[in-house]
Amino acid sequence: MIPARLSLVTLGAVDVTRLRDFYEAMGWKPATSTEDFASFVLGGAVLALYPRDLLQSEAAPDLAAPPAGSWSGVTFALNVDHVDEVDQVFDAAVRAGARPVAVPKDRDWGGRSGYIADPEENRWEIAWAPGARFDTRGAVIDF
């Protein structure tokens, strides 16, 4: 049987240092940090930063990198405990250097969310979803 879990997400970074500095400015503490690698423990998963060219040579040697200025089709979500936290966290991310993409608003699916882009245009949804519950580490236990 294959375990149903997501352990680690790696972002192929053009500039690992710049991206690491941004996530540190958001208040995230690196678990590991070198010139070519950084990792952050986020609840029950790890966010890793690794040079894009090295990651591509390992994970996608048969594919071209997306052209500059294009979207990868992937978003990440940072879900909060209470609806009023969406705007607060969104504003804090912008103060840390994120670019606002879509300001928070109430969504048809019953929650509230907005989108930001990190310095390399990775998209993060800052969201509150009714029914989402987290353990003390911030890991999702119900959704």
Image (cartoon, helix red, strand yellow):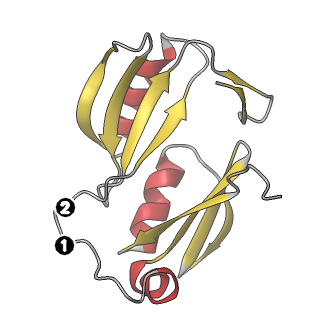
Residue 67, numbered circle: 1
Q: Between residues 100 and 130, which one lies in front from this camera angle?
A: 130
Type of the residue with mark 2: Ser
- Place residue 17 in its image quadrant: bottom left
Q: CA distance from mark 1 to mark 2?
A: 6 Å
Q: Is residue 90 left or right of residue 43?
A: left
Q: Element at badge 1? A: loop
Q: Which residue corresponds to the image point at 71% horizontal and 33% vertical from the top-left?
A: 138
Q: Is residue 47 left or right of residue 26?
A: right
Q: Between residues 111 and 36, which one lies in front from this camera angle?
A: 111
Q: Which residue corresponds to the image point at 16% horizontal and 63% vertical from the top-left?
A: 69
Type of the residue with mark 1: Pro
In this view, 76 is above or below 18 = above
| Residue 96 visible somewhere in the drawing | no
Identify the residue under disc 2.
Answer: 70
Residue 72 position, x and y percent, is: 31, 59
In this view, 93 is above or below 104 = below
Q: Which residue corresponds to the image point at 25% horizontal and 71% vertical from the top-left?
A: 66
| Circles 1, 2 touching at the beta carbon (< 8 Å) | yes
| Residue 72 visible somewhere in the drawing | yes
Residue 141 position, x and y percent, is: 75, 29
